[in-house]
Image: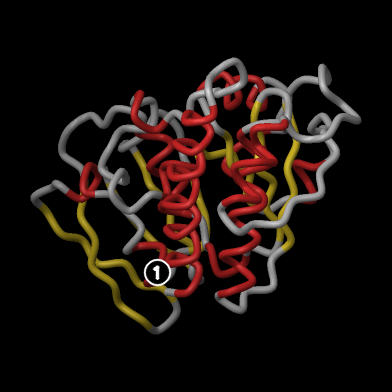
């Protein structure tokens, strides 16, 4: 495998089943998870006039292409984020409200909205337990459910999903040039970045038919993920 640069571009060959190219900077290099950086060789990347060291992979990686996408994403350029679940009445409204709150408190001017992969609840308010949990936890919410639209792939810089079914549904309609934007939101939890991208612990379970305690658990998961996102954006 090899890494090479040209005019600030980096390409990864042979580590993955196909080539992926993109801008690289110091912050994106640091975003590699322990799973990816548990390696034994160094190479140097030249980005502009700066030199960075990173590791080269010597074994197959589970979910390897998702790691590559995270590696190549420049979070500094993100200006819009969509949070997506199935129906847009439970998990994604919580993610939207929490992430917007964290971004505003960090002084980051980033647009955040949410949507569902399906249209079952389009036009409805958020689930009553979603509203209760958010308001009792000090958040404000005013929500109308909607379905994710294909044109939003072009308009959003980052798309955060709750589970693998959400991810599969979006990948099925995403133009190939925007596939790299789709990620499980919990992957940004600093305590979970070592996990492969299809790991069960990265899933935010749907609390739709569950007691309110499950909604509080979802809130806790997404607060940790939102904190991780803000941390990466500010690096």
The residue lying at 37 percent from left, 72 percent from top is 26
Could you say which is closer to the camera, residue 14 or residue 22?
22
Badge 1 is on which residue? Answer: 27
- Residue 95's quadrant in the figure? top right
* Crowd rating for badge 1 (residues with CA inside 10 Å; few <14, some 14–19, many 20+): some
Q: How many marks?
A: 1
SS class of the residue under badge 1?
A: helix
Residue lying at the far bottom of the rendered structure: 49
The residue lying at 69 percent from left, 46 percent from top is 82
Give percent across and percent down for residue 69. 47, 45
Could you say which is closer to the camera, residue 27 or residue 106?
106
Could you say which is closer to the camera, residue 36 or residue 205?
205
Residue lying at the far right of the rendered structure: 123
Q: Is residue 49 above or below residue 2?
A: below
Residue 131 shown left or right of residue 196 in the figure: right
Q: Quadrant of the N terminus?
A: top left
Q: Is residue 95 above or below residue 29?
A: above
Give percent across and percent down for residue 212. 54, 29
Q: Quadrant of the C terminus?
A: bottom left
């Amino acid at each position: 495998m090899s890494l090479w640069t040209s005019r600030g571009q980096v390409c990864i060959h042979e580590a993955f089943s196909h080539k992926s190219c993109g801008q690289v900077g110091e912050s994106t290099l640091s975003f590699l998870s322990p799973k990816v950086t548990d390696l034994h060789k160094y190479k140097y990347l030249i980005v502009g006039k700066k030199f960075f060291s990173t590791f080269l992979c010597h074994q197959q990686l589970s979910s390897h292409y998702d790691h590559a996408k995270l590696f190549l994403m420049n979070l500094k350029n993100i200006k819009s984020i969509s949070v997506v679940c199935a129906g847009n009445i439970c998990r994604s409204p919580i993610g939207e409200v929490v992430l917007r709150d964290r971004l505003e408190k960090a002084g980051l001017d980033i647009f955040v909205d949410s949507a569902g992969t399906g249209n079952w609840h389009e036009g409805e308010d958020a689930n009553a337990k979603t509203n209760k949990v958010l308001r009792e936890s000090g958040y404000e919410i005013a929500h109308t459910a909607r379905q994710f639209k294909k044109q939003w792939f072009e308009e959003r810089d980052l798309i955060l999903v709750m589970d693998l079914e959400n991810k599969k549904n979006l990948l099925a309609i995403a133009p190939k040039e925007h596939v790299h934007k789709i990620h499980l939101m919990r992957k940004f939890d600093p305590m979970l970045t070592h996990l492969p991208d299809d790991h069960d612990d990265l899933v935010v379970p749907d609390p739709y038919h569950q007691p309110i305690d499950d909604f509080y658990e979802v809130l806790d998961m997404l607060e940790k993920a939102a904190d991780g996102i803000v941390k990466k954006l500010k690096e």
